Image (spheres, rainbow, N blue to C red):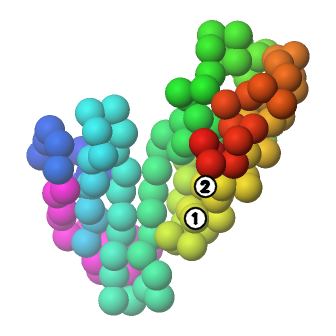
Amino acid sequence: RAAAAKLPGPLGRYSTQLRVGGAAGTLWRCEVSSVHSYLVFASDQLTDDLVIDVSIKQFLVLSDWMDDRHYETCAAAGLLNDEPDIFIGTDDDLAQLLAQDALLQNMRTLYRASGDSLSTAPFADAAEL
């Protein structure tokens, strides 16, 4: 965290060398937008790069298809409480977490909890999803 804080901004991809748990490598800060950054730690001593995302929950639902009531329901029902606040894992781990099936299940759960019809939901059409 201290090494990542030293990386410059604003948008783009920046790196610094450091040692984590005895493994020397490069910590990359990758900025997708002004509101989302994630880190990647790459080392020749590791089989796979590690992805570190401290705002992963925002990608477990499709905010474009959510109204205020959906956010309120999500918070009140604790729909994402079982999900970790921080993701640390490989690209494969991240792909499983953010797979279309997982996203669809999260959105169905949210819409059901909000009392919304699944048949008229924006994601009812597989092509839309």
- Answer left or right for 60 relative to 27: right
Q: Is residue 19 magenta?
A: yes
Look at the magenta stretch and give its main secondary structure: strand
Image coords of residue 119 (percent x, y): 83, 30
| Camera-side residue of 127 and 89 | 127
| Residue at figure coordinates x 46%, y 50% from the top left | 53
Looking at the image, residue 83 lies above or below residue 94: above
Looking at the image, residue 93 lies above or below residue 121: below
Disc 1 marks which residue?
95
| Residue at figure coordinates x 28%, y 77% from the top left | 25
Looking at the image, residue 122 lies above or below residue 39: above
Label pair 1/2, CB-CB below 8 angstroms: yes
Q: Is residue 80 visible?
A: no
Residue 22, disc: none
Disc 2 marks which residue?
98
Q: Quadrant of residue 121?
A: top right
Q: Amino acid at mark 2?
A: Leu
Image coords of residue 28 (percent x, y): 26, 62
What is the crowding at mark 1: few (fewer than 14 residues within 10 Å), some, or many (at least 20)? few
